[in-house]
Amino acid sequence: MKSLTAGATACVLGLGGALVPTAAASPAPQTRLVLGGSEYAHVPETLPPAVTKYLTPNLEIGAGFFPDTTPLLIDYPASVLQRGTVNQHIDIGADNLDAAIRQRQEPLAVVGISEGAAVLDTERARLENDPHDPHAPAADQLQFVLFNSPTRGLATTLFRQGAHIPVVDITVTPPVESRYDTSLVIHEYDLWGDFPDRPWNLVTLLNATMAVVFVHPIANDVPSKIAPENITTVVNSKGATDTTYFVATPTLPLTEALRVVGVPGKAVDVLDKALRPVVDAGYSRNDRPGDPRPYLDHGVLTTHRASRLGNARTPIHEAAHATAAAQRSPATTHGHLNSRG
């Protein structure tokens, strides 16, 4: 299983600092503000188990993180079929989310999946860009959880920071450091949140494309059920906790389609086992030390050696890459990293 070990990540990112105790827990929220993905307006709240295995109903998004909260779905034009660009849709979503946050004088959980996760990052940036806003919630009044974010996954692999993506009208920018605790959930192989950095590996790319159906719409994870070695927790410069959860996918999305149409499980398991090394080769995080093969990072073709010499990489990519190295090590560590300074 791929893991995201905090100790290994610290070494790669050069965060330094010692392991520190967990920050004090924020007040328990009673309300969960929900931003669905581009399909949210078309997803019914009652679905059969065969479907909910792959698609989380809107009002259940984030319920695994905040099980006793009342969901409130935030409306916005989250669809490529709506008038306007994706960026305009995200701005409208952020406007509606901001209004909902300010209407409530209580601790809130804010959760979003896919395009909804991009809305969350836009709102986080707005709250940080106006630190003197007297009406902004206190640091312990908001908690954010982002599931399978395309702006933190695919965009950071294919495009340079600052690049403007036409049609969708989005400029690639790194997420702000926020004073609010924020969690990012990445599902392995997801086309949007875990885009392969060797997309020329066509088997890997096909698997990631199939993950749009079988992996991307999942947002019902329970933190306590995610292996501790797959969780990285960092205290940022604002004193908030940023946590990354890497959720391993037990069966390849590429072979999951065969299971759905009734191919015997044992036969699919054999095929899955044979294909997995080919699929995993499309992600540089699985490479062994000294692997010379190139990969993409921020739209730049690079190698592990070039990366060590200072080529910029995303924290998510580094965390996942450190995981693979730690997995081959006889011992791994997990803890909370102090990244200040």
Image (tube, helix red, strand yellow):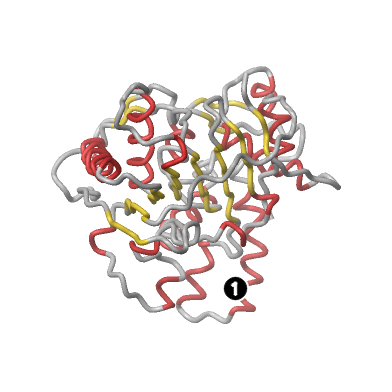
Q: Is residue 277 left or right of residue 165?
A: right
SS of the residue at dot 1? helix
- The answer to which quarter of the image holds residue 338 is top right
Q: Is residue 108 left or right of residue 203?
A: left
Packing grade of label 1 (10 A; few <14, some 14-19, many >=20) is some
| 127, above or below 327, in the image | above
Number of residue marks: 1
- The residue that appears at 64% across and 18% down in the rendered structure is 310
Q: In front: 166, or 199?
A: 166
Where in the figure is residue 57, as x and y percent of width and height? Answer: 35, 66
- The answer to which quarter of the image holds residue 251 is bottom right
| 183, above or below 178, in the image | below
Q: In front: 176, or 80?
A: 176
Where in the figure is residue 159, as x and y percent of width and height? Answer: 43, 29
| 18, above or below 271, in the image | above
- The residue that appears at 34% across and 60% down in the rendered structure is 71
- Name the residue tied to disc 1: 268
Identify which amino acid the numbered label 1 is placed on. Val
Q: In front: 329, or 147?
A: 147
- The answer to which quarter of the image holds residue 93 is top left
Name the quarter where the C terminus is drawn.
top right
Where in the figure is residue 180, as x and y percent of width and height? Answer: 46, 36
- The residue that appears at 67% across and 25% down in the rendered structure is 15
Name the quarter where the N terminus is drawn.
bottom right
Q: In front: 232, or 31?
A: 31
Which residue is most to the right? 330
Q: Is residue 139 left or right of residue 166?
A: right
Where in the figure is residue 120, as x and y percent of width and height? Answer: 36, 41
| 312, above or below 112, in the image | above
